[in-house]
Image: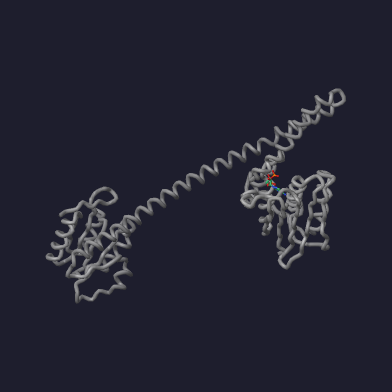
């Protein structure tokens, strides 16, 4: 009974049969037609190329020994044509003829069938290779679709980044104008204003300062991500640098103990101001999260490869699931928001990019209730 076989375009697959022996050609044609395929029989290699170019078949059954172009030559020519090279080619070889199997695969054949035919076997091989070919086409189509979607997303993402960058950049001047006006107003009128009237002005000034700090962080991160942040490396003693940072942080929480373990100088080549900001960011976070009489310890270690700076605090600790996320843009720990700490989630992103721009690494070890150790290593060369 004739079964209905359908290809990807919902029509029966079209098989091109090439054989110079009319009896073989007729037999295969009939059998495949009865199985529901569309069949195009031709009796020479030259005709096969022409037929494939005129109407692309889904598969080619190709005799090897033919006068004129033999099967290998036909296959080679098909495979060199970009429009035809995906069509699966099954070689047909008579028992007793020498079938060079290696050559059959080398010129691009996917399989071979021996004459005289066992039709069940022919049908099985044809079906298998048609299915494989269909799956491969579908996969290629999906890959193309995925690639197109990815390209579209990339364009939209670039557009969004450019727009964000433009807005953020243009916010700087009006924000500076707000800050300067508020400060001028406070200076000129502070004696005449009550404390209750000054308070909202101070709050507004502080908020504007935060906004400008956020704008600056975003612009710096943007520049580092695009590799446009110039580094000014110089020989730098990280112990000395950490000591300066500790002095600048102490006023944030006067009762907090800020300690530096002193191994002597720890020299690495780095951009001093950038690394100062890294130590300041991590240190300021630590000071912010430890209790009023808490403790933050700065460890500087010389290693063979470079210098490692550890900043250890006895604050609330950070749950494991946030250990990677907090180094990403706007990454914040949800539970800490309940502590009503102001945070943009940009500081550690800046630190990561700055350390990595130096060829270094940054990380965190922390357990809830046991404090946190942020560390980074800068290479000596
Ligand atoms: P921000 O610049 O707003 O301070 P960060 O990127 O520096 O943000 O930090 C991201 C988040 O990581 C913070 O919101 C906070 O939840 C958490 N975090 C950073 N440092 C510590 C710390 N020492 N202890 C506890 N949580 C911390």
Q: Is residue 36 left or right of residue 151?
A: left
Location of residue 303 with respect to 174 vertically, above or below: below
Point out residue 342 in the picture as x, y percentages from the top left corner.
Answer: 71, 39
Location of residue 138 with respect to 302 vertically, above or below: above
Is residue 224 in view?
A: no
**Quarter of the view holding residue 94:** bottom left
Q: Nearer the viewer, residue 284 or 336?
A: 336
Q: Is residue 137 left or right of residue 226?
A: left
Q: From the image, which quarter does the C terminus lie in? A: bottom right
User: How many numbered marks are there?
Assistant: 0
Q: Is residue 31 left or right of residue 56?
A: left
Point out residue 229 in the picture as x, y percentages from the top left corner.
Answer: 67, 50
Q: Nearer the viewer, residue 351 or 373?
A: 373
Point out residue 336 in the picture as x, y percentages from the top left corner.
Answer: 68, 43
Q: Nearer the viewer, residue 116 or 381?
A: 116
Q: Give the colour scheme shown.
A: one colour
At horizontal 74% and vertical 62% (from top left) the residue drawn is 307
At horizontal 51% and vertical 46% (from top left) the residue drawn is 154
**Quarter of the view holding residue 207:** top right
Is residue 367 in view?
A: yes
Q: From the image, which quarter does the N terminus lie in? A: bottom left
**Residue sitting at the far right:** 191
Point out residue 280 in the picture as x, y percentages from the top left corner.
Answer: 76, 49
Q: Nearer the viewer, residue 341 or 10?
A: 341
Q: Is residue 295 left or right of residue 118?
A: right
**Residue sitting at the far left:** 23
**Quarter of the view holding residue 70:** bottom left
């Amino acid at each position: 009974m004739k079964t209905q076989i359908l290809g990807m375009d919902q029509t029966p697959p079209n098989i091109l049969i090439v054989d110079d022996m009319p009896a073989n050609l007729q037999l295969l044609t009939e059998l495949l037609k009865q199985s529901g395929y569309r069949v195009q029989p031709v009796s020479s290699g030259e005709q096969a190329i022409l037929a494939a170019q005129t109407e692309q078949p889904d598969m080619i059954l190709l005799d090897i020994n033919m006068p004129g172009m033999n099967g290998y030559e036909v296959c080679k020519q098909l495979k060199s044509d970009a429009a035809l090279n995906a069509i699966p080619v099954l070689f047909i070889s008579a028992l007793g003829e020498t079938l060079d199997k290696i050559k059959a695969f080398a010129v691009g054949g996917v399989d071979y069938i021996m004459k005289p035919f066992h039709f069940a076997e022919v049908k099985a091989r044809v079906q298998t290779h048609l299915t494989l070919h269909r799956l491969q086409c579908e996969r290629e189509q999906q890959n193309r679709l995925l690639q197109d979607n990815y390209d579209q997303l990339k364009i939209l993402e670039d557009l969004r980044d450019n727009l964000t960058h433009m807005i953020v950049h243009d916010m700087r001047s009006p924000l500076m104008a707000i800050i300067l006006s508020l400060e001028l107003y406070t200076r000129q009128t502070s004696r005449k204003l009550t404390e209750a009237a000054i308070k909202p002005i101070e709050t507004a000034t502080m908020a504007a300062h935060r906004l400008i700090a956020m704008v600056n962080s975003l612009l710096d991160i943007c520049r580092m991500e695009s590799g446009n942040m110039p580094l000014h490396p110089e020989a730098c003693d990280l112990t000395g640098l950490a000591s300066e940072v500790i002095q600048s942080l102490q006023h944030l929480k006067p009762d907090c103990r800020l300690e530096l373990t002193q191994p002597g100088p720890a020299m690495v080549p780095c951009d001093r101001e950038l690394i100062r900001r890294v130590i300041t960011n991590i240190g300021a976070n630590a000071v912010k999260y430890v209790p009023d009489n808490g403790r933050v310890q700065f460890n500087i270690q010389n290693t063979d490869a470079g210098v490692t700076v550890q900043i250890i605090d006895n604050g609330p600790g950070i749950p494991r699931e946030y250990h990677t996320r907090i180094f990403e843009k706007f990454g914040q720990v949800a539970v800490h928001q309940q502590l009503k700490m102001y945070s943009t989630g940009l500081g550690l992103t800046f630190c990561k990019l700055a350390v990595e721009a130096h060829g270094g690494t940054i990380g965190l070890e922390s357990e809830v209730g046991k404090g946190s150790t942020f560390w980074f290593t800068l290479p000596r060369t």
